[in-house]
Image (spheres, grey):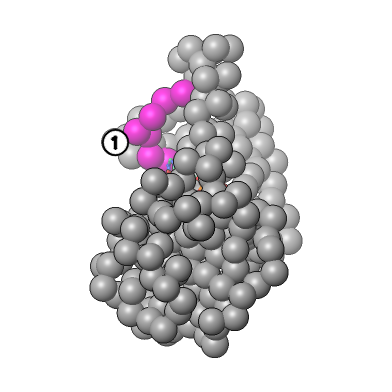
Amino acid sequence: MNRPDLLSVLEAGERRLKPDAIHLGCRVQGFRQNGSGVALLLEGGETVTGDVLLGADGIHSHVRAGLFGKDESRFTGQVAWRGIIPMERLPPHLTRWVGTNWVGPGRHVVHYPLRRGEVMNFVGIVERDDWQVESWSTRGSPEEFAADFAGFHEDVQIMIRAIEVPYKWALMLREPLPRWTDRRVTLLGDAATRRCRTWHRAPCRPSRMV
Ligand SMILES: Cc1cc2nc3c(=O)[nH]c(=O)nc-3n(C[C@H](O)[C@H](O)[C@H](O)COP(=O)(O)OP(=O)(O)OC[C@H]3O[C@@H](n4cnc5c(N)ncnc54)[C@H](O)[C@@H]3O)c2cc1C
């Protein structure tokens, strides 16, 4: 399932229950808690209060930093490239409803269809030590992307050429948190999981060697 699709379903359900429940464009800076509640401090100086705070603000969580201090991450020596390809840009033999894993020395590629087969998700991992930015939104250049997978099978090259905007993400490791909660404040999702995850939960056929 494509994450934006899941988020749309959750958003629609939440707005049906409580039309004003979601406030976009509010960046959290920190929080204060005492015996009677939690005050959430937003950029711009606004404060919002409530009974409890659930911090689901991702891998660079401000709520986690407020609970347990700034985290320390360690680079794995691997960089992930990712991109989404509209299926109509691919030749028929690459549009089948299977997950595929291409494995080579120091590099591998996983791709699988999403959104009822309308798009192909592409993730390529390469071992390199010159990029250590952990970000969803950092764009790489198509030339750098192609260079990282030079020599891979032509099917992989076709997909790389079909990705207009490749994103690159340095994979980092963190020690597990001993606990997620302090009184009225707790963590959820990546904010709470300071560990290296196993991704690619799509069904895979046997790997091909390149
Ligand atoms: C390259 C790559 C491939 C992946 N592939 C898979 C996969 O195939 N399958 C899989 O299951 N998982 C995969 N993952 C992991 C998955 O994306 C994450 O585990 C998941 O997105 C975590 O969800 P989350 O809601 O906890 O955090 P996020 O999705 O990071 O959401 C956090 C939210 O908090 C918001 N936020 C951040 N800071 C603030 C702030 N200060 N104030 C207010 N809001 C804030 C952000 O804008 C964002 O909306 C992949 C991750 C990467 C990097």
Dominant SS in magenta: loop
Q: Position of residue 19 (x, y in %)?
A: 48, 12
> Residue under circle 1?
44
The local crowd at label 1, few if under 14, some if 14 to 19, many if 20 or more residues have their Cα within 10 Å, is few
Q: Quadrant of residue 152?
A: bottom left
Q: Find the magenta span and give its range.
A: 22-29
Residue 94 vertical position relative to residue 86 in the rendered view, above or below: below
Q: Where does the image place residue 73, in percent across and percent down from the top left?
A: 53, 71
Q: Residue at x 29, y 36 (%)?
A: 44
Question: Which residue is at the front of the view, 123 or 75?
Answer: 123
Say which residue appears at 59% left-offset and 41% top-offset. 1
The residue depicted at 56 percent of the width and 20 percent of the height is: 14
| Residue drawn at x 48%, y 82% as measured from the top left | 127
Q: Residue type at mark 1?
A: Gly
In this rendering, does residue 89 appear at all?
yes
Which residue is more in the foreground, 75 or 105? 105
Is-magenta flag for residue 24? yes
Is 140 located above or below residue 38 in the figure? below
* Residue extending furthest toward the right: 178
x and y percentages locating residue 20 in the rendered image? 46, 15
